[in-house]
Image (cartoon, rainbow, N blue to C red):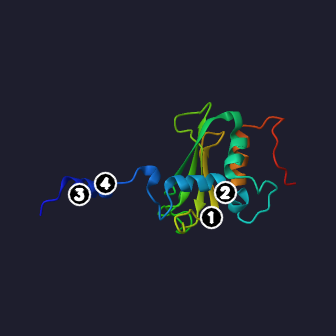
Amino acid sequence: MKLSRSVAAMIAVLLSPLPLAAQPAGGASKAALAAAGRQATLELIDYGSDYCDGDMTVEAWLKALVGRHAHSISWSGGKCVLVSDMRPGIDASEWPYCAQATITLAHPKSRKDVPMIEIYLEKPEHGRPGKAYAFRGTMETRDDGPEYIRFRKDFEGLWDERFPPGPDTARCKND
């Protein structure tokens, strides 16, 4: 049986892969996962801790934290990359529902000096990303060693140690 050109063209379109931003990760696009991570509130990723900035979005917190020390923050979504396969579960490498923020520093120590945070999301439902539930991060410390970070406040502390905040830096106090 010979197919007409229009039918063959339609089949080729249907079988071609989607652009990366449109590819579903279990029902939610990579762009939707990135947006969900940016807009998640801090209280969702603080493991039950009640900090005074809990209603702030991850995106607003990160912009305020990095300030002038970063040229840019780029967001992406998809498979989790800051993983540990030593303990199967929420941060194992097969979890495909994350949002990543990659920070391009104004004055990096080296090419490998690229801090990143990752927001883990629950499984999507009905094409929408699930709720944010975990934080992971990585960055070079002031002593030049890479650090894998499991808590937002620990990332904030390491950032402040490496890039001390100015006297005018407004931060939420939990004392």
Q: Identify the amino acid type marked 2.
A: Ala
Instruction: State the separation of the CA atoms marked 4 and 2.
Output: 35 Å
Q: How many numbered circles are shown?
A: 4
Instruction: State the separation of the CA atoms marked 3 and 4.
Output: 10 Å
Instruction: State the separation of the CA atoms marked 2 and 1.
Output: 8 Å
Residue holding disc 3: 7
Instruction: State the separation of the CA atoms marked 3 and 2.
Output: 44 Å
Residue holding disc 2: 40
Q: Residue at x 57, y 66 (%)?
A: 90
Callout in the foreground (3, 2): 3
Residue holding disc 4: 13
Residue holding disc 1: 131
- Residue 125 in sight from this viewpoint: yes
Element at badge 4? helix
Q: Relative to the observer, which residue lies in front, 96 or 20?
A: 20
Percent from the top left, x then y, of residue 87?
A: 54, 67
